[in-house]
Image (tube, rainbow, N blue to C red):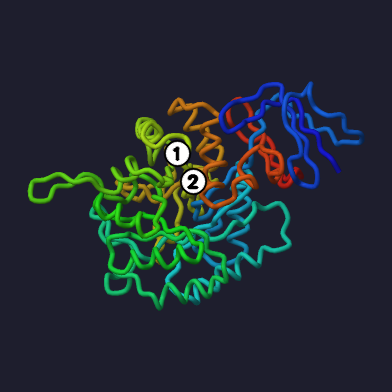
């Protein structure tokens, strides 16, 4: 049945279109424009948007969980809880982000996602984003994951086994490019259609340039757990931060929650990188969606006490962040209200840009004829009022 969305402001990739309307047929956008110009369609279901903003559904390419469910835990119920929490905040497509150390673990995560089959009202699964295990040490916190002897280099036997176990479900994979074997890892997975990403890295600017030539085309959570200006023999040299800000053709994530990045760093990223290549990500943990308080959460195999306050997750001593609790609409809200960016640009960074990054341009992340009718209604405060998957209301 045709659906006619009207009485709304359409959020387009480069502007807001007031007095807008949109038609959906068979789950796809079939027309959009000014409401007075809408074609006459008999028997269309009319959906009054109450003057709200009608935007493409958000695409979060980096999330570890939410609503009490962890994507680190390969259990269908955990995945479903996380997917549902993100849907409630406007996210209609996800690349859940586990950290996988073996082919057996990868098989379990694939089974967990398949275990959600048949459950209604969950965001679209677009594939996995694997964050690790090839991470460099963070000088501020010491070692992050396993010992150097295990993952200080990229072992082809391991990552090829993980790829086989994934059965084509991996779409992005992060590694620190300065580690031995990682450049060849990047070349190998790029040939398979997997996007190599840079993160958790102490690489120099020169090493990032070499990684770019090897197929790495993205930098995850800018400023977080990555090198910046250092000195060697008295000479200053740039790091991953400077490479992300300066090198063209790198898609760059930012955790735009106002905590991991304050408004001035969000604005600096926008100024240097522009509206085309920045992607807003939640990097949310299982505690996203929970109220302030003290909780326990498993991090890298250890149960830690976690404090939620000031809009972020903190370590017990409050010296470090212990993960994000952001949601889709909060990211857009922060970029608009705190960093002063236009709504269309903030939405673009959570829709069109990640869609392009994943090779889904024209299909998702944009109000354009022929695209999937995954939609979110936002009020003037940029809070989610309704969510539609393929034109069907689910929130």
Q: Is residue 373 left or right of residue 199?
A: right
Q: Is residue 43 left or right of residue 181?
A: right
Badge 2 crowding class, 10 Å Cα cut-off, few under 14, some 14 to 19, many 20 or more, is: many
Residue position for label 1: 257
Residue at x-position 44% and y-position 64%: 99
> x, y (%) of residue 108?
55, 72
**Which one is in front, 16 or 389?**
16
> Residue 260 sits in which quadrant?
top left
Residue position for label 2: 282
> x, y (%) of residue 281?
48, 45
Task: Label 1: state its secondary structure.
Answer: loop
> Residue 155 sits in which quadrant?
bottom left
Note whether 200 is above or below 344 in the view shown. below
> Residue 188 sits in which quadrant?
bottom left
> x, y (%) of residue 268?
35, 32
Task: Label 2: state its secondary structure.
Answer: loop
């Amino acid at each position: 049945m045709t659906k006619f969305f009207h009485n709304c402001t359409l959020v387009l990739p480069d502007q807001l279109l007031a007095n807008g309307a949109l038609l959906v047929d068979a789950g796809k956008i079939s027309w959009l424009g000014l409401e007075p110009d809408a074609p006459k369609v008999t028997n269309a279901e009319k959906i009054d948007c109450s003057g709200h903003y009608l935007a493409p559904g958000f695409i979060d390419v980096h999330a570890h969980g939410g609503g009490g469910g962890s994507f680190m835990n390969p259990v269908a119920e955990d995945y479903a809880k996380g997917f549902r929490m993100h849907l409630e905040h406007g996210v209609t497509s996800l690349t859940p982000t586990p950290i996988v150390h073996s082919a057996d673990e990868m098989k379990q995560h694939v089974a967990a996602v398949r275990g959600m089959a048949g459950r209604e009202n969950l965001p679209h699964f677009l594939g996995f984003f694997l964050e690790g295990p090839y991470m460099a040490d963070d000088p501020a916190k010491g070692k992050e994951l396993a010992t150097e002897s295990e993952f200080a280099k990229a072992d082809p036997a391991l990552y090829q086994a993980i790829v086989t176990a994934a059965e084509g479900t991996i779409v992005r994979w992060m590694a620190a490019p300065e580690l031995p074997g990682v450049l060849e890892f990047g070349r190998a997975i790029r040939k398979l259609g997997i996007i190599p990403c840079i993160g958790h890295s102490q690489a120099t600017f020169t090493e990032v340039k070499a990684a770019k030539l090897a197929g790495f085309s993205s930098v995850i959570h800018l400023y977080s757990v990555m090198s910046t200006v250092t000195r060697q023999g008295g000479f200053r040299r740039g790091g991953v931060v400077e490479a992300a800000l300066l090198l063209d053709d790198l898609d760059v994530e930012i955790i735009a929650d106002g905590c991991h990045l304050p408004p001035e760093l969000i604005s600096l990223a926008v100024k240097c990188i522009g509206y085309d290549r920045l992607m807003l990500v939640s990097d949310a943990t299982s505690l996203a969606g929970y109220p302030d308080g003290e909780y326990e959460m498993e991090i890298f195999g250890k149960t830690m006490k976690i404090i939620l306050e000031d809009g972020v997750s903190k370590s017990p001593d409050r010296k470090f962040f212990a993960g994000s609790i952001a949601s889709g609409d909060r990211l857009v809200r922060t970029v608009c209200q705190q960093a002063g960016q236009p709504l269309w640009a903030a939405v673009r960074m959570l829709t069109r840009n990640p869609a392009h990054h994943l090779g889904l341009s024209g299909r998702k992340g944009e109000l354009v004829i022929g695209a999937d009718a995954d939609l979110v209604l936002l009020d003037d405060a940029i809070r989610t009022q309704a969510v539609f998957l393929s034109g069907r209301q689910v929130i």
